[in-house]
Image (cartoon, grey):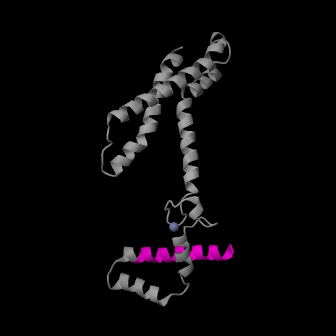
C-alpha cells in the first residue's frame, strides 16, 4: 500500500534528477550555470507530472487487481512487479538515452569523434578529413620522423612528440584498414 502511494512521488523525483543531471553536469564542466528561467521550471514541473502519472497509473494497473491476494501469494514477485511499474518512467528514460547514444554513434567519425552525420562517413565510419589524412600517412616518412625528433630533442616537449607519434600510428592503422577494405 505504501509503495503504491509513495512510489510515484519517489519515481517522479528520481525521474527529474535523471532528466536534469546531465545538464547540471555539463554546466559544471564548462564552468557555467544552468539558466533557471520560468520555462525551465515549467518544463521540470511538466516532467514530474508526467513521471508521477505514468508511475501511478502503472502501479495501479499492476498492483490493484492482485492487491487482495498479494499477501496470500508470493509477496516478493508482487513487490518486484510493483517496483518495475512504479519506476517505469526512469527505465523508459534510460532506454531512450541508450537508443539516442547508439544512433549518435553512427553519426560520428570513429577516428576524430567529430559529429558529421552518417552521410559524410565512409564505409569504415571515417570522415573525409580523417580518411584523407590516413591515406596521406606514409609508413616511412623521414620528414615527419625528423620533425618528431626535433619536437622531442630541441623543443624538449616529450608529451607533444608522443602525441605526434600516436597520431601517426593511428593514421597508419586506419590506412591499412581502408586499403584492405577495398
Ligand atoms: Zn574524423
| Residue at 53% across, 43% down | 97
Does residue 40 show up magenta in the picture?
Answer: no
Above or below 65: residue 120: below
Choose between 66 and 107: the one closer to the eye: 107
Q: In which quarter of the image is residue 147?
A: bottom left
| Residue at 52% across, 33% down | 90
The secondary structure that most of the magenta stretch takes on is helix
Q: In which quarter of the image is residue 119?
A: bottom right
| Residue at 53% across, 73% down | 170
Choose between 38 and 174: the one closer to the eye: 38
Image quarter in which the N terminus is found: top right
Q: Which residue range is magenta in the image?
A: 161-182
Residue 20 appears left or right of 139: left
Percent from the top left, x then y, of residue 158? 37, 77
State how many labels appear: 0
Does residue 171 show up magenta in the picture?
Answer: yes
Q: Which residue lies furthest to the top in this view?
A: 68
Image quarter in which the C terminus is found: bottom right
Choose between 62 and 70: the one closer to the eye: 62
Residue 81 appears left or right of 145: right
Percent from the top left, x then y, of residue 155? 32, 82
Percent from the top left, x then y, of residue 73? 68, 15
Choose between 76 and 144: the one closer to the eye: 144
Amino acid at each position: 500500500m505504501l509503495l503504491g502511494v509513495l512510489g510515484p512521488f519517489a519515481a517522479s523525483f528520481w525521474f527529474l534528477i535523471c532528466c536534469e543531471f546531465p545538464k547540471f553536469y555539463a554546466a559544471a564542466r564548462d564552468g557555467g550555470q544552468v539558466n533557471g528561467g520560468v520555462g525551465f521550471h515549467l518544463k521540470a514541473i511538466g516532467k514530474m507530472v508526467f513521471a508521477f502519472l505514468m508511475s501511478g497509473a502503472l502501479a495501479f494497473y499492476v498492483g490493484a487487481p492482485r492487491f487482495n491476494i498479494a499477501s496470500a501469494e508470493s509477496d516478493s514477485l508482487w513487490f518486484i512487479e510493483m517496483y518495475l511499474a512504479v519506476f517505469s518512467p526512469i527505465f523508459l528514460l534510460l532506454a531512450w538515452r541508450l537508443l539516442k547514444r547508439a544512433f549518435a554513434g553512427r553519426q560520428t567519425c570513429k577516428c576524430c569523434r567529430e559529429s558529421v552525420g552518417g552521410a559524410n562517413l565512409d564505409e569504415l565510419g571515417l570522415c573525409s578529413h580523417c580518411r584523407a589524412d590516413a591515406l596521406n600517412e606514409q609508413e616511412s616518412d623521414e620528414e615527419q620522423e625528423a620533425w618528431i625528433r626535433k619536437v622531442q630533442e630541441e623543443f624538449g616537449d616529450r608529451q607533444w612528440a608522443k602525441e605526434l607519434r600516436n597520431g601517426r600510428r593511428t593514421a597508419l592503422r586506419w590506412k591499412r584498414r581502408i586499403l584492405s577494405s577495398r
